[in-house]
Image (cartoon, rainbow, N blue to C red):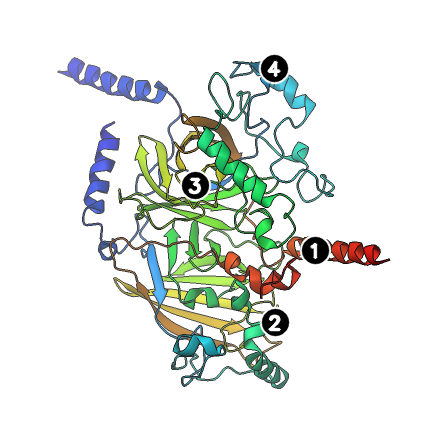
Amino acid sequence: MLRQLAVTFVFALAASGQAQSTRPARTADGKPNLNGIWQALNTANWDLEGHAAQPGQVVAMGAIGATPPGLSVVESGKIPYLPAAAAKKKENYANRVKLDPEVKCYLPGVPRATYMPFPFQIVQSQKRIMIAYQYAGAERIINMGAPTKAPDLFWMGWSNGHWEGDTLVVDVASQNDQTWFDRAGDFHSDALHVVERYTPITADALMYEATIDDPKTFSRPWKISMPLYRHLENNAQLLEFKCVEFVEELIYGHLRKKPAQ
Amino acid sequence: MKTSWLSCLMLVLAACVFAADEGHWAVPRTPDGQPDLQGTWSNATNRPFERPKQLGAKEFYTEQEAAELAKKGFIGDRGGPQEVHYDFSQYGMDANQARFAPNLRTSIVVGPEGRVPPMIPEAMKRNADLAAKAKGHDLDGPENRGLTERCLIYGQQEGPPMLPPMYNFNMEIVEEPGYVAILNEMYHDVRLIPLDGSPHLAEDIRQWRGDSRGHWEGDTLVVDTTNFTDKTRFRGSSEHLHVVERFTRTTPKTILYQFTVDDPHTWAKPWSGELVMGPSNGEIYEFACHEGNYGMMDNLSGARAEERRAAEANQK
């Protein structure tokens, strides 16, 4: 009873001033506290490489559908495609409205899930870290115990994590070849292997790095990096973006009894 | 002096023993002191949702009756469409192969009736109107298919309240000081339940699975959910559906899951149910429902092919 009272008192102290930014820097088991709602603030999801603004693909959307400009998040600037893959990327780009899996509300894979234009939430416990993404209900569990193997290829892969000092290192294996890295047609094979690093740089920002390794598609491993910013509004919350409903006409419209005019 | 020190110690020891005896085994705590509900859990149950009529007011089987029933195999409900061409021994749909946590109840719905109360006239009309509109159109387009087939949510089971789907009865619970997260394998959906006492979303924001807020009452997690859409329609409910769930870890390998449902626009009184969750057999797998939705493609194109065939036959 006394112990319960003591715990409640400590918890009440910690809970007072519940603005997201007053989270303790470390969890009760001494690890960097990554709990919270985060979001990337860049145009990586449009194009990982540096890009000037471009007109949109749908005339009626006007400026809303246009590609915003952005600097490269790829450390060497350009993605080192093998020659055949470089040709495929060009073809992807030319047909991106038809081919980008994001258009159909498909799961984004890793690392794209991290820099989608939606928040995501980290729920961190000792043995398991869950990341829930607002986009399409994408989620993954990072196993922090002894590494395990995926039973099959998944859209979101299979994640095993460990701490290196204050950096969360996540090894993501077993992704299928169906996802793209961005809306510009950057793609990969099922040989993709990603290693992510999440490092706190301030109380409210992480540095996110991801090393991409896929010998079927790229001539060498390459790396992206970007800050992830904490949502500081007091009532920050992931809301549902169940986009499956929004793409039914696109995917199944031609099979309607009475197709839309 | 020595004697009183000893009796003081005895009192403390006695208090410890008494506290341990009182009720039950002590729930383990997370490092920050919250009751630990974490792990992968299965809500597969060998009990039907509503009590079989012949059992009347009988809420519990005896241990012996339950053991006899277990020999008969699966006596619960099969969530999901019944007129399917699946081989139920495949895809984990053979409920006889599922493992069930021990549970002496005769049904999920509790109380003397063990059945969902009748709908109020307003709800009967609302649902009858919906059914009349849908009749004869069930293959017209994607919106005419059920939520489950559309891969929007696993209809009627994903909840809250969370009820066992036809297969993959798995969920994972992860806790941090400010939130409890529940990942339902069907359909890869995470419930993020804040524990900070914040109010529900504004009335005009509705969600398929509502908006959940939680708090601890002793060792029990209490979760209050409102703000459902009018398309969720749990058992014919309206958007005024309100669900309260309670999660209590009763043994190292069981969580008692209790829920109360109320919707004054659907039922005259609230009703409650409970089931016992046991450990899941391994990890949560990815259920990429929408990405692999050949069912929708095949059902709609099959219906269009049937219509073309019928039209051609008529022309002859």
Residue A209, relative to residue B303: is it above or below?
Answer: below
- Residue A33 lies, in percent from the top left, at 31, 55
- Residue A80 lies, in percent from the top left, at 53, 83
User: Along the line of sight, which residue is nearer the eye, A75 or B299?
Assistant: B299
Could you give the CA–CA distance between mark 1 and mark 4, rounded to whole angstroms?
41 Å
What chain does mark 3 sit on? B
SS category of the residue bearing label 1: helix
- Residue furthest to the front in view is B315
Q: Confirm or deny contact between disc 1 and disc 4 (CB under 8 A).
A: no
**Residues behind callouts 3 and 2 on a single chain:** no
Residue bearing the label numbered 2: A189
Please indicate, yes or no, whether residue A187 appears anywhere in the rendered image: no
Q: Amino acid at mark 4?
A: Gln
SS category of the residue bearing label 4: helix
Could you give the CA–CA distance between mark 1 and mark 2, rounded to whole angstroms?
28 Å
Pointer 3: residues within 10 angstroms few (<14), some, or many (20+)? some
**Residues behind callouts 4 and 2 on a single chain:** no
- Circle number at residue B298: 1
What chain does mark 4 sit on? B
Residue bearing the label numbered 4: B54
Could you give the CA–CA distance between mark 4 and mark 3, rounded to whole angstroms?
38 Å
Residue B4, relative to residue B89: is it above or below?
Answer: above
